[in-house]
Amino acid sequence: MLPDATEIIVYVGYALLAFGVICLVLSIIILARQAINKNVETIAKQTTKLAEKGITDGASGLVGNASLLINSLNELSRSTSGIGIFFVFLSLVLLAAAYYFLKPFIGLP
């Protein structure tokens, strides 16, 4: 037996609510893991010291590779933050849509 339109709307609302909560939890995990993980900063500091040593020793190839590594680490850090922030906004949209679908059925104005 096929469900009627009301049941479908309720199912969609609950699915949106579940996906919104999952996205919110994922965003919290991603952003917290990035805040806790300080290895990127440590590697960047060591690479900067290596680049300075390369400059004083005249090793231009070493400096170029160290600069490339620093830029790659910075991009990695930015992209991880971007993904976490994207998941925060996606979860807000999903939760708002779930509220819109479910509010007639739970008695909210």
Image: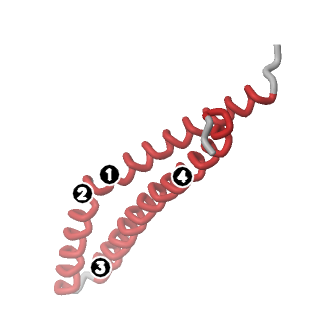
Q: Amino acid at mark 1?
A: Ala
Circles 2 and 3 in contact, beta carbons < 8 Å: no
Q: Is residue 81 above or below residue 65?
A: above
Circles 4 and 3 in contact, beta carbons < 8 Å: no
Viewer-proximal residue among 39 and 92? 92
Name the residue: 49% across, 39% down.
Answer: 22
Give the number of the mark in front: 4 or 3.
4
Label 2 vs 3, first from the N-terminus: 2
Q: On the picture, is 41 further left or further right than 75? A: left
Q: Is residue 106 above or below residue 23?
A: above
Residue under label 1: 32
Could you give the CA–CA distance between mark 4 and mark 3, rounded to whole angstroms?
A: 44 Å
Residue under label 2: 39
**At which x and y percent is residue 50?**
20, 74
Circles 1 and 3 in contact, beta carbons < 8 Å: no
Q: On the picture, is 48 further left or further right than 8? A: left
Name the residue: 37% across, 69% down.
Answer: 74
Could you give the CA–CA distance between mark 1 and mark 2, rounded to whole angstroms?
A: 14 Å
Residue under label 3: 63
**At which x and y percent is residue 82?**
47, 61
Label 1 vs 3, first from the N-terminus: 1
The residue tagged with tag 1: helix, strand or loop? Answer: helix
The residue tagged with tag 4: helix, strand or loop? Answer: helix
Label 1 vs 2, first from the N-terminus: 1
Q: Amino acid at mark 2?
A: Asn
**At which x and y percent is residue 69?**
34, 69
